[in-house]
Image (tube, rainbow, N blue to C red):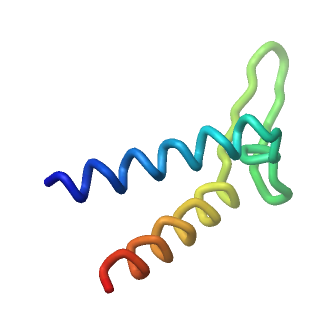
Amino acid sequence: MARLLIIAGVVLIALGLVIKLGLPLGRLPGDIVVRRGSGTFYFPIVTCVVVSLVVSLLAIIFRR
C-alpha cells in the first residue's frame, strides 16, 4: 500500500509540473471540440490516448 501511495504522489507531482510548464495537454491536435450557439462540447480523445500510454509505460517500469 505504501508503494502505491508513493507512486501516486510521484505521478501527481509530475502531472503538476507538466501543467505548470504550460504543455498543451488537453489541446492536442485530434481532440474533438464542437461549438454551437452558446454551448461547447469538448472530448480530449488524443489527450486520453497519450495519458494512457504514459501511465501504461510507468506501470511496466515500476512492475520490474
**Which x, y percent locates residue 41?**
70, 32
Q: Quadrant of the C terminus?
A: bottom left
What residue is at 79 percent from the left and 41 percent from the top?
Answer: 21
Foreground pick, 49 / 19: 19
What residue is at 81 percent from the left and 46 percent from the top?
Answer: 24
Residue 35 found in image quarter:
top right
Residue at the bottom extreme, as displayed: 64
Q: Is residue 38 positioned above or below 17 on the image?
A: above
What residue is at 53 percent from the left and 43 percent from the top?
Answer: 13
Foreground pick, 38 / 15: 15
**Which x, y percent locates residue 50?**
64, 64
Q: Quadrant of the N terminus?
A: bottom left
Instruction: Please state the total of marks drawn on the protein image.
Output: 0
Foreground pick, 27 / 9: 9
**Which x, y percent locates residue 26?**
72, 44
Q: Is residue 55 positioned above or below 34 on the image?
A: below
Foreground pick, 4 / 47: 4
Q: Is residue 2 left or right of residue 52?
A: left
Residue at the left extreme, as displayed: 1
Q: Is residue 45 left or right of residue 1?
A: right
Q: Is residue 13 left or right of residue 8?
A: right
**Which x, y percent locates residue 45?**
65, 56
